[in-house]
Image (cartoon, helix red, strand yellow):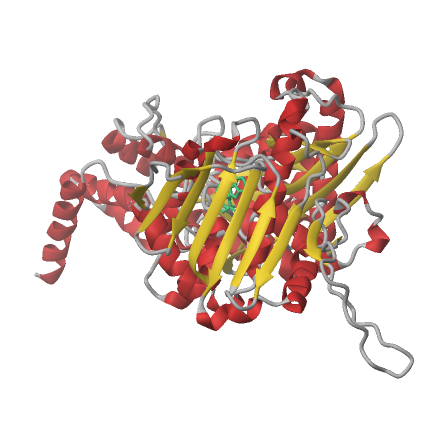
Amino acid sequence: MTTATDKETLGFQTEAKQLLQLMIHSLYSNKEIFLRELISNASDAADKLRFEALSDGTLYEDDPELRIAIDFDKEAKTITIADNGIGMSKEDVINHLGTIAKSGTAEFMSKLSGDQQKDSQLIGQFGVGFYSAFIVADRVEVKTRRAGLDKSEGVHWESEGEAEFSVESIEKEGRGTTIILHLREDSADFADDFRIRSVVKKYSDHISLPVMMEKQITPEYDEEGNEKPVEENLEPEFEAINDATALWTRSRSEVEDDEYKEFYKHVSHDFQDPLTWSHNKVEGKLEYNSLLYVPAKAPFDMWNRDATRGLKLYVQRTFIMDDAEQFLPLYLRFIKGVVDSNDLSLNVSREILQQDPAVDSMKSALTKRVLDMLSKMAKKDAEQYQAFWDEFGQVLKEGPAEDFSNKEKIAKLFRFASTHSNSEVQDQSLEDYVSRMKEGQEKIYYVAAENYTTGSNSPHLEVFRKKGIEVLVLFDRVDEWLMGHMMDFDGKGFQDVGKGELDLGELEDEADKQEKEKLESENKDLVERVKTVLEAKVEEVRVTNRLTDSPACLVVNDGDMGAQMRRILEQAGQAMPESKPILELNPEHSLVQKLDQESDEDRFSDLVEILFDQSTLAEGGQLDDPAAYVHRLNKLLLELSQ
Ligand SMILES: Nc1ncnc2c1ncn2[C@@H]1O[C@H](COP(=O)(O)OP(=O)(O)OP(=O)(O)O)[C@@H](O)[C@H]1O
């Protein structure tokens, strides 16, 4: 009997095509990971079925024992991986196996350089999934049927991993997905019992689903040492080739580091090893297991607020949902892992999670775990912690605003660039800063700028350099906003060196104060003259002893927004209330002294305008009228050269 087929040939989405090519070339040296990826997908499919079956038991049909079965054919050079999980409908197949419906794909694609070596690292970060089949196969077939659909609604997908794939309806008795890999000549050695077993053991031992293979018949010998004939027509026997217990339910002492690492790759779809992890069993009022990982690299979509985040939630070993974001605060969104609760109901939904007080207690306990894990890492391995900080520091900086109760703990994890290390690497902790504070120093000083160079060369730092006082140089966009939420650390307040009158507290000696008063009275007239010129532009003019090399600088009033924060908000198109800076003059500087002696009012006013504009430029600001500045400067230069 022949039936009309509905076979259609479709083109891969452009990104999928590019990714396929890249993957085949770049993952060549680590071919065996295809098996991990396909087993991981099969295990996810089993989890999804288990979850849907909670509300509709008929989905199990008459096949409730979930498993993955692997078979191979040496002659035909094929490997077959079959699961009886949720399966896919025709629409699912077209959507999932013809496109890459992942957030961050476009961004990922734009980062590719065309240099295979560099790109292969990126692709690892991106996660390879189903397409990894094409690393070893030049033709891949998928036969699948979604649980609950009629057996006539099976689908056959096939592709050679070039530009196209075909889909066609088929009859499929059992639900779930069977993937047949037609191995490339150079990968034919994977069609081998020992090879498959060892790869599965290596990568997928921890999967809670049994991976079954046909038992090999061990030859038996008679007393004379001759091999006994094997019984014909013997039913093949299958055995699980992996451990098949959920890794997080095992005790810590039984789990090897390599197993933790492989499990991480399974839950996170990451390609690299995690930096560290924390595995805990909690008993008492609430009972749950958690296994939390810190990835080595930030995902591409970390800054996308809609990006997936959160843990995999299990209830009594049953998978409930991916991306359960209720268990960790937003500033820890980079953490991956599993939480398995004994208290929640199997019918729990996202809405219920949001209201459940037990979830709140778990969230605060898990948050502490993560913070402890990070501080342990910082103490144990500074290099590793630095790698973490470089990737995730900026996210962690959202912490004090979101999580007031852990403010001090989070602050201990921060690292900043500082005048102490004289480098833009953010590797100085607040504890270290405090331990280096000068006798009588009451505040933690910082300067905020567009970048490290502008910050560290800011005129505001001159007096601090002179007195040997350390200043933190902040240049991440979130920094000033962060400082707005920090208040203090270890009882010491934070002070923006570009804000308010210079107040060095106890660090200023009596001689300094007297000197300043003397300068103020000596320069009273000058200050008044400058004020008249800049009346429209500044709030106030005063003399200062904070400068050594620069003639002048701008500061903002204590209660006002810092200049850098203002610039960021203005760039983002926010309308800002009018606010004028304060101009501080260094009366010791010869330019300022010359200014004082200038009797020509026009020339005086030009010089003052130039000083003002230069002070704006020195702190990384932009001039309102750059052409006027250039014009005045050129006038001066001409006079000089005459
Ligand atoms: N064995 C399977 N059973 C059911 N659905 C599957 C199976 N394998 C893949 N899929 C579907 O195809 C989709 C794409 O799989 P793929 O492995 O490419 O990406 P992923 O698993 O979503 O993410 P990653 O690339 O990070 O692994 C899956 O999300 C799933 O919906």
Residue under the point 32% across and 54% down: 590
Residue under the point 42% across and 45% down: 157
Q: Nearer the viewer, residue 540 or 112?
A: 112
Q: Residue furthest bottom?
A: 224
In the displayed structure, would residue 238 be above or below residue 605? below
Question: In this orientation, does residue 317 appear?
Answer: yes
Counting the numbered discs, the total is: 0
Q: Residue furthest left?
A: 642
- Give coordinates of residue 263: x percent, y percent: 67, 51
Residue under the point 52% across and 27% down: 149
Q: Residue furthest front?
A: 1
Q: Nearer the viewer, residue 532 or 344?
A: 344
Question: In this orientation, does residue 512 appear?
Answer: no
Drawn side of residue 110 relative to residue 384, left or right: left
In the picture, which quadrant includes the N terminus? top left
In the displayed structure, would residue 410 be above or below residue 633? above
Locate residue 233: give its quadrant. bottom right
Residue under the point 62% across and 27% down: 59
- Give coordinates of residue 573: x percent, y percent: 30, 28
- Give coordinates of residue 630: x percent, y percent: 15, 48
Locate residue 25: give its quadrant. bottom left
